[in-house]
Image (cartoon, helix red, strand yellow):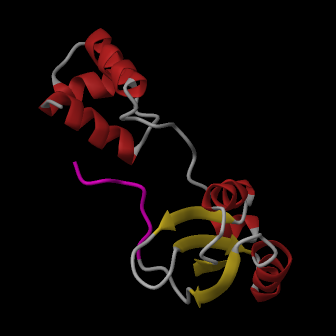
Amino acid sequence: MNEPDKKILSLLQSDNKTPMTTLAEQTGLSVSAVNDRVRKLQTNGTIKGNCAVVDPEVLGLELLAFLFIDLHQDADEEAFIQQMKSLTEIQELHHVTGQHNYLAKVRVKNTKGLQSFLSQKLKRQPGVAQTETLIVLQSEKETTVLPI
């Protein structure tokens, strides 16, 4: 990846609605060259998507929790992963090292919503042995911006 591509990615991470003319001015390239580079970055998977970052509290999703999830040894992990992907409360799911199998980032309305999610959805999944929940008191930094 060359420097103009890095500059384009950096600018788009800050604001993915940055006009092509602005990207061209900032990189010293023509608008058509920037257009081609952005299209190539999308096609090769470097840019995975374009989306709005919504404030969860505006939607009433005031509780953020991280869940460690342990599976039984004979659990069907592929089926588990597919089920987790279908649960809208789970924003992220990571296979991790250490004593737990997975770490999930979960957003719900409140503690009652978390308890319902745990008892009605997560713990009813085949293969789930146990969970450990960490409730976030305050988020000091959340970002989707990667260092370029």
Comparing 103 with 113, the one in front is 103
> The N terminus is located in which quarter?
top left
Q: Residue at x 46, y 37 (%)?
A: 48
Q: Which secondary structure class fits the magenta region best?
A: loop
Q: Position of residue 92 (x, y in %)?
A: 56, 62
Q: Is residue 64 left or right of residue 144?
A: right
* Residue 135 shown in magenta: no
Left or right for 104, reference 30: right
Image vertical order of residue 94 relative to residue 30, above or below? below
Q: Is residue 110 left or right of residue 10?
A: right
Q: 131 or 112, which is in the foreground?
A: 131
Where residue 128 sits in the image (x, y, percent)?
69, 76
Q: Residue placed farthest to the front in the image?
A: 74
Picture quarter containing residue 19? top left
- Seen at 67% across and 71% down, the residue is 107
Is residue 2 shown to the viewer in this render?
yes
Which contiguous range is marked in magenta?
Answer: 141-148
Q: Position of residue 116 (x, y in %)?
A: 84, 81
Q: Residue at x 26, y 22 (%)?
A: 24
- Above or below residue 36? Residue 115 is below
